[in-house]
Image: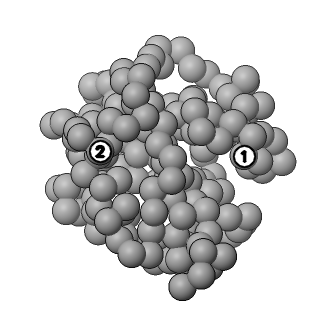
Amino acid sequence: MPETSFKTATLGLGGNVGDPVHAMAIALRAIDAREDCLVSAVSRVYRTPPWGKTDQSHFFNACAEVKTRLAPEALLDVCLEIERGMKRERIERWGPRTLDIDILTYADIVQAGPRLELPHPRMTDRGFVLMPLADFAPDLVVNGSSVRDWLSSADIGGIEVADQGRHWWRSA
C-alpha cells in the first residue's frame, strides 16, 4: 500500500511487575514486526511513582509513535492481544501490571466510543505520559494545546529518567 495510507498514532506503555522494560521492548518489537505497523519514534524510559493506586511498586513508562494502516479499534485489539500475551491481568483499576499499552492519539481523530476514547481522556493530566511523549512529540496538539504546554503544568514529582537511550527497545 502507498505510504500515504499510514496514519500516525502515539502509544503509552508501562508496567511495574516482573521486568516491565523488557515487556515494553517485546511489545514494541511485536508491533514493529507487523506489516501494517512501523514504530517510528520511541521515548527514553522513565521510572515513575504509582498513580491512582499508590500502595504499589514504581512503574517504568515510555511512549512510542507508530505509523499504521490499522483502524484505531484494530490497533487497540493488537495492543490488547500483546498485553494478554505478556500475562496482563485486569484485576483492579490502576493496579500492578506486567504491561499496559494505551493508545494516546490516533491522527486527528476525536472520538468517545465504548471501547476507545481518543485522545486518551486522562493523558493531559499525567506527567508519566507527557514526559516521555515530549521526548519525540513536544509540539503534538492534544485537546487544543501542545504536549509541551500540557507538560508545563503537569505534576512530574518523582519522575526520573531510567534509560537515556532511544533504542532500548531493540535490545532489552
Q: Residue at x 66, y 76 (%)?
A: 4
Could you tell me how many numbered marks the image carries?
A: 2
Separation of residues labelled 2 and 1 (CA atoms): 25 Å
- Label 2 is placed on what type of residue? Arg
Estimate the x, y position of residue 118 in percent, counting from the top left: 64, 62
- Label 1 is placed on what type of residue? Leu
Which of marks 1 and 2 precedes in the sequence? 1
Q: Which residue is mark 1?
A: 140
Q: Residue at x 18, y 36 (%)?
A: 19
Residue furthest toward the right? 144
Query: Which image quarter: residue 51?
Result: top left
Which of the pair 24/154 is nearer the observer?
24
Q: Which residue is mark 2?
A: 170
Q: In which quadrant will I find the C terminus?
A: top left
SS class of the residue under badge 2? helix
For label 2, count other residues whose C-alpha is less than 10 Å away and answer few (under 14), some (14-19) or many (20+).
few
Task: Name the mark nearer the viewer: 2 or 1.
Answer: 2
Q: Is residue 95 visible?
A: no
Left or right? Give the position of 27 relative to 158. Answer: left
